[in-house]
Amino acid sequence: MAVSLLLAALAALALVGINEAGYRQSSRALADIDAALKVRGTLNQILQNMLDAETGQRGYLLTGEASYRQPYDTAVKQVDGHLAALRQLYAERPAERTRLAELSKHVLRKIAEMDMSVRLRQDGKDEAWKFVITTDVGREEMDSIRKAAGELAEISNQTLHQSQIQVMKSLRLARIGTAIVALAAFLAFFLYLRQAHALRSIGERQQETLQRERNALEDEVRERTASLAELATHLQDVRETERGYLARELHDELGSLLTAAKLDVARLKSRLLEAPDATQRLQHLTELLNSGIALKRRIIEDLRPSSLSNLGLVASLEILGREFAERSGIQVQMVLEPVAMDESRQLTIYRMVQESLTNIGKYAEASEATIVLKNYENHAVVEVADNGKGFDPQRIRPSTHGLAGMRHRVEAARGRLTISSTPGRGTRVSAMLPIAKTL
């Protein structure tokens, strides 16, 4: 790329230099041509003036009428101006100035000879002016004028010819320079195209390499995401299984122990009616056992809601909402439609509603909450909304595992979770799950 740019810059500089040199040479040559043409024109005018003066002189001498003298007078007046113009044109040419001085001398002598004959004719001295006419002085001066003018004209012709040659050389140089610069520009353009093609090829190869690496990374990310999703689903299933196992153990073992203890306390109480202090202690122990049994039931329901398998999804959600309202003091409105779904998706909906109510109780500062379950034949929609303080969904912290776990649980069931919230205007958590009807 740098080589082509350098070559193009050198070609441009060379073209500018050639054009500048040709312009200066052509300008000088054109100036010389213009001066030579002016010299030739002025010399021709001088010769024409001398011929006009000689014609007017002879006409006046022959007729004696003043009208014939007018061309003579006009020509004599113009000659001085033409000689002055030639002096100006030859101001910087010493050799031509010498020849111009010779021409001026003969012109003045010829004018003096003609002026003498005219004055003699005007004074009526016919013999004198006729004598002057018969001499060869005038003819010799005229020949000398023609000769000097011819020499100057020849010099002008040579200058004109040399200037024309110079112009042709300048044009030829410009053509050669243009051709060279065009070749250099073509070479630079060729080098540029080749380098551009090479850079484009390198860029394409880099893009292909980056694309392959990107595809490989995306494949690896997809594989790891799928593995993590499978692992999370497996851990979730294991968690639910462990919860179910723990709930059964608590129900079977701890429940039977607490029930047996309560029965034993009841027997002791019936036999110790006459001991008030012992009866009071047994009553307190009975209350503690009742609290333990209630706690056991609540823990079991949290671990694995028995109402879900015994009473169904709608009843389980009603119980969940009613108990939440009693504990939190938040008014809960429920609109629940029966939905025929497999146990896994029912548990997903239950856990989503449970997690949403937990978040409302902890963070929302709400006074009302709504639970809605709608059946749309091929899918079900469940919504949990509140009128609390809300939040900005775009600024959810990564540490909010509850929402992340809720989303994963819904997506693992092939559903879609939507969280809509505005600060000061409450929150709405909505999930849509496909219905897999139980057989």
Image (tube, grey):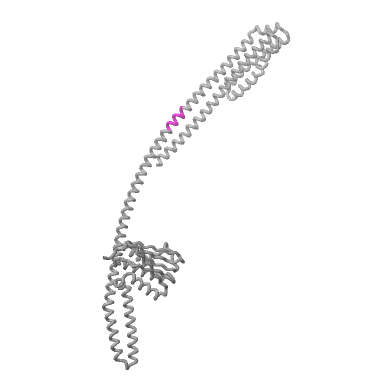
Report the front residue among 335 and 147: 335
What secondary structure do most residues of the magenta stretch adopt? helix
Report the front residue among 266 and 235: 266
x then y, percent, for residue 82: 63, 20
In the rendered image, the vertical position of residue 323 relative to residue 43, given as above or below: below
x then y, percent, for residue 358: 38, 71
For residue 12, say whether it is visible. yes
Residue at image coords 53%, 19%:
157
In the rendered image, the vertical position of residue 190 relative to residue 431, given as above or below: above
Quarter of the rendering containing residue 122: top right
Where does the N terminus fall, quadrant-wise? top left
Report the front residue among 214 and 82: 214
- What's the magenta region? 172-180
Where does the C terminus fall, quadrant-wise? bottom left
Q: Residue furthest top?
A: 127
Q: Residue furthest bottom?
A: 274
x then y, percent, for residue 253: 26, 78
Q: Residue furthest right?
A: 123
x then y, percent, for residue 350: 34, 69
Residue at image coords 61%, 12%:
142
406 inside magenta stretch = no
In the rendered image, the vertical position of residue 246 relative to residue 149, given as above or below: below
178 inside magenta stretch = yes
For residue 399, say whether it is visible. no
Count the numbered circles shown.
0
